[in-house]
Image: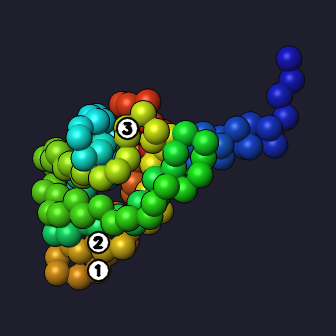
Amino acid sequence: MHISKSLIAALALIGSQAAAEDAGPFLTVDLNAQATGEAGCLLTFLIDNAHPSEIESAVFETVLFDQAGQVDRLTLFDFGALPAGRPRVRQFQLDGLACEDLGKVLINGASTCRVDGKDSAICGQSLKLRSSTAAELIG
């Protein structure tokens, strides 16, 4: 079997790009739980800041979609301070929304991200999203 040098080079490039995408550190956000209450849906997020620095303030512009894919609302989720190397749990009450009506949550971008007293891009550049619920978390 003969494999061309250009094919080997292309495969090596693809492999190195995939490895670079998997290289950390990341800010991992997991939509961990949903609970319907009298007022609406309570979303619980588990956030892990694997960066070497504390994120002093992280606020994300968030879009909520219903099961039909229609925008329900645009809001800001203030995750507050996220210490380096330690997980944090944050909850957000969504009044007037039943959890079973929530189809997906879009992290549209970081509205605020402060590290070492300055604005930083790490909240958006290294974001890794997942959902442990029926609702999809995308970004």
Residue type at numbered disc 1: Asp
Whole-percent x and y of residue 77?
A: 30, 61
Q: Residues within 10 Å of mark 2 (few under 14, many from 20)?
A: many
Q: Tell me which corner region of the image, top left, top right, bottom left or bottom right, holds residue 38.
A: top left
Who comes first in sequence, dot 1 or dot 2?
2
Q: Earlier in the sequence, mark 2 or mark 3?
A: 3
Q: Along the polypeptide, which appears first: circle 1 or circle 3? A: 3
The image quadrant where one finds the N terminus is top right
Mark 1 touching mark 2, by CB under 8 A?
yes
The residue carrying mark 2 is 113
| Residue 138 x/y as whole percent | 49, 48
Amino acid on which disc 2 is placed = Cys
Q: Nearer the viewer, residue 77 or 87?
A: 77
Residue at left offset 30%, top offset 53%:
95
Residue in the foreground of this view, choosing between 4 and 106: 106
Please state which amino acid type lies under the numbered disc 3.
Answer: Cys
Q: Estimate the x, y position of residue 34 in percent, counting from the top left.
A: 30, 36
At numbered mark 3, what does the secondary structure look like: helix, strand or loop? Answer: helix
Disc 2, SS: strand
Query: Residue 47 versus residue 16: which sits nearer the camera?
Result: 47
Q: Is residue 3 shown to the viewer in this render?
A: yes
Picture quadrant of residue 87: top left
Q: Which residue is mark 1?
A: 119
**Mark 3, residue position:** 99
Name the residue furthest bottom. 118
- Which residue is at a point 74% across and 37% down the rendered structure image? 8
Mark 1, secondary structure of its residue: strand
